[in-house]
């Protein structure tokens, strides 16, 4: 049994896509900020065990920090918030270490953690903020809001008597007001379309599940599709349930969609890989400065899907745990990786709870795929350059041509059966699929970025519920078409939100826009699986994958290339 299978270690091996908290304190002079940044780094380091020889240096550094903070607090010309200064220094210090070590202030820690826990305590709504007003996108199935009859399109005007409309409300404000301990009560006043008076709801908060496998369906009689949005505490259980459901429907081939998945719990990716790999296959290894972090994870139990063909979809937004799963499949020749080069995050973070409720996520190891590749892309002290990597890839042409990607021969590795793969930054797919921009346009982007499309879909769904009452999700996918009249109404919603009509872009993107509106309307009326069924019909990575299952099977069944050479 691989050491990383233990739940205790899973909790220590959290991974999170980089999260930056930026604070600008221009009124504080640069020398003070730099001193705080350096001193904060020393202070963080002092919380860990150090060799005895370093103790004197640590004491001197901590005393220096105390000196600086005392002078700033007592003598600086303006009033300052010393805690904010320290937090700013911590963030700047961590940026200097690596791109993925991060500090999460106490006010954010619970929200960030809930995204990985798989559940939170709240009222159970998916919400959006449109024109400074909180809209209910959908009440969550089985939650208290659904039970009380709260509807999509309802506007949250007051919470516990406090006005929430037209006051610059943010997502954080919504979380702080609507989330709370299970069993607590919150009073919410809603405005419903075509009703004059507000509707008051007394909502008893409850446990609300968050799902990370957001779509699962049969493409045809043989191929199953699973979309994984992140790797959370419940992802592995959700994955097993999806496999069970799809196998009961005759699935013999599997597409795992990790496009845009930023990662999460390393243990979830390892356990999922174990369901696909057999024969004690190595899944991932990690190495750090401290020996206890040097570990390897192997497939150790009979998997639910060790025989059928597998294709994994990745792109530039697939990171961290996504790359662990993709790398394990590729290096063990279990299936094909299709799409574009993944993000390139091969650093492991350990969460450390701080005394004030904040959290430090400190890089404690690098992980390596079974062939020995480090997937971490290069980084240095230039944090902004690291953040611009996607832009650089786009400008360099990487999203459109595999030939633009140059690999260093010193980073050449071999899969179990002798295929060549490369380290140095991300997982390069076995089959490259260029980014298709032929249908998109600036006008379509503006319609969505301004929330015009979301507002139109919400209103259309509410005003036309009766039309869809007897239509199944399958019938909707096969038969429903977005009309020109609907698009004209969408254009008017755009104008209302100051999106100027662009006839050229509209003509270019008309069919694309119809697909997007159908997908979002399908999500509103049915579920996420309906959304992905519709939108995948124009997803070139997905469509290419469906044509490559013969290749995936050949790789899985191929004889080891080294054995062939020896026989010759």
Image: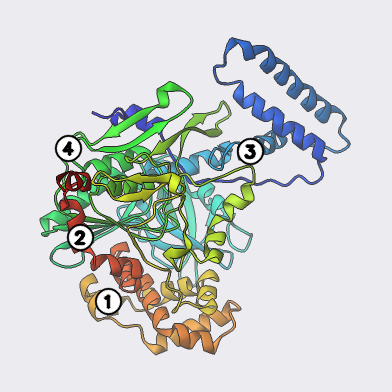
Q: Is residue 22 left or right of residue 303?
A: right
> Can you tell which quarter of the image residue 165 is in?
bottom right
The answer to whether the residue labelled 3 contacts the one labelled 1, judged by CB atoms less than 8 Å apart, is no
> Can you tell which quarter of the image residue 120 is in?
top left
Mark nearer the N terminus (2 vs 3): 3
Residue 468: mark in rendering: 1
- Whether residue 180 is visible to the viewer of this picture, yes or no, is no
Q: Which residue is mark 2?
A: 224
For label 3, count other residues whose C-alpha is less than 10 Å away and answer few (under 14), some (14-19) or many (20+): some
SS at mark 4 in the image: loop
The answer to whether the residue labelled 4 contacts the one labelled 2, judged by CB atoms less than 8 Å apart, is no
Above or below — where is 252 with respect to 121?
A: below
The Cα atoms of the two marked residues, 2 and 1, are separated by: 26 Å
Q: Quadrant of the N terminus?
A: top left
**Which of the two discs, 3 and 1, sits closer to the camera?**
3
Above or below — where is 243 with respect to 180?
A: below
The answer to whether the residue labelled 2 contacts the one labelled 1, judged by CB atoms less than 8 Å apart, is no
Above or below — where is 257 with respect to 285?
A: below
- Whether residue 78 is visible to the viewer of this picture, yes or no, is yes
The Cα atoms of the two marked residues, 4 and 2, are separated by: 24 Å
The Cα atoms of the two marked residues, 2 and 3, are separated by: 44 Å
Residue at left 45%, top 42%? Answer: 346
Q: Which residue is mark 3?
A: 96
For label 1, count other residues whose C-alpha is less than 10 Å away and answer few (under 14), some (14-19) or many (20+): some
Mark nearer the N terminus (4 vs 3): 3
Q: Which residue is mark 4?
A: 279
For label 2, count other residues whose C-alpha is less than 10 Å away and answer few (under 14), some (14-19) or many (20+): many
Mark nearer the N terminus (4 vs 2): 2
Residue 498 in percent (x, y) is at 61, 78
């Amino acid at each position: 049994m691989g050491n990383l299978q233990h739940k205790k270690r899973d909790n220590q091996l959290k991974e999170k896509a980089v999260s930056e908290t930026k604070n600008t304190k221009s009124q504080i002079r640069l020398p003070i900020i730099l001193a705080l940044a350096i001193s904060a780094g020393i202070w963080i380091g002092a919380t860990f065990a150090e060799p005895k020889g370093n103790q004197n240096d640590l004491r001197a550094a901590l005393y220096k920090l105390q000196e600086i903070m005392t002078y700033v607090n007592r003598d600086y010309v303006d009033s300052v918030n010393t805690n904010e200064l320290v937090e700013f220094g911590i963030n700047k210090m961590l940026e200097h270490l690596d791109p993925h070590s991060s500090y999460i202030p106490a006010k954010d820690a619970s929200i960030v953690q809930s995204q990985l826990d798989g559940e939170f305590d709240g009222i159970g709504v998916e919400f959006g903020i449109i024109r400074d007003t909180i809209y209910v996108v959908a009440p969550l199935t089985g939650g208290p809001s659904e039970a009380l009859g709260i509807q999509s399109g309802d506007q949250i005007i007051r919470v516990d008597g406090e006005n929430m409309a037209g006051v610059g409300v943010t997502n954080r404000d919504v979380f702080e007001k609507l989330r709370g301990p299970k069993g607590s009560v919150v009073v919410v006043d809603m405005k419903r379309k075509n009703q004059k008076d507000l509707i008051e709801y007394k909502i008893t908060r409850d446990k609300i599940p968050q799902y990370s496998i957001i779509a699962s369906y049969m493409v045809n009689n043989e191929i199953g599709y699973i979309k994984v949005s992140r790797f959370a505490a419940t992802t592995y259980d959700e994955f097993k349930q999806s496999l069970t459901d799809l196998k009961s429907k005759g699935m013999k081939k599997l597409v795992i969609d990790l496009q845009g998945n930023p990662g999460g719990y390393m243990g979830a990716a390892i356990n999922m890989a174990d369901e696909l790999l057999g024969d004690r296959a190595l899944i991932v290894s990690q190495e750090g400065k401290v020996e206890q972090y040097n570990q390897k994870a192997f497939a150790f139990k009979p998997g639910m899907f060790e025989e059928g063909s597998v294709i994994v979809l990745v792109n530039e937004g697939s990171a961290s745990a996504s790359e662990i799963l993709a790398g394990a499949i590729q290096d063990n020749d279990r299936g094909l990786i299709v799409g574009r080069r993944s993000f390139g995050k091969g650093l492991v973070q350990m969460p450390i709870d701080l005394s004030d409720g904040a959290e430090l996520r400190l890089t404690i190891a690098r992980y390596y795929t079974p062939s020995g590749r480090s997937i971490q892309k290069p980084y240095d002290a230039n944090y902004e350059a690291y953040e611009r990597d996607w832009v650089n890839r786009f400008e360099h042409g990487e999203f459109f041509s595999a030939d633009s990607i140059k690999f260093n021969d010193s980073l050449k590795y071999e899969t179990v059966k002798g295929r060549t793969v490369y380290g140095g930054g991300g997982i390069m797919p076995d089959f490259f699929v260029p980014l298709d921009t032929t249908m998109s346009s600036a006008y379509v982007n503006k319609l969505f970025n301004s929330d015009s499309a979301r507002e139109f879909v919400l209103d259309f769904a509410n005003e036309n519920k009766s039309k869809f009452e007897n239509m199944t999700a399958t019938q909707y996918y096969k038969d429903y078409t977005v009309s020109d009249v609907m698009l004209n109404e969408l254009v008017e919603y755009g104008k209302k939100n100051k999106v100027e009509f662009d006839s050229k872009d509209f003509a270019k993107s008309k069919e694309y826009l119809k697909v997007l509106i159908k997908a979002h309307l399908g999500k509103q009326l049915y579920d996420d699986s309906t959304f992905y069924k519709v939108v995948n019909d124009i997803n070139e990575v997905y469509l290419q994958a469906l044509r490559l299952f013969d290749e995936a099977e050949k790789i899985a069944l191929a004889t080891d290339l080294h054995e062939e050479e020896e026989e010759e």
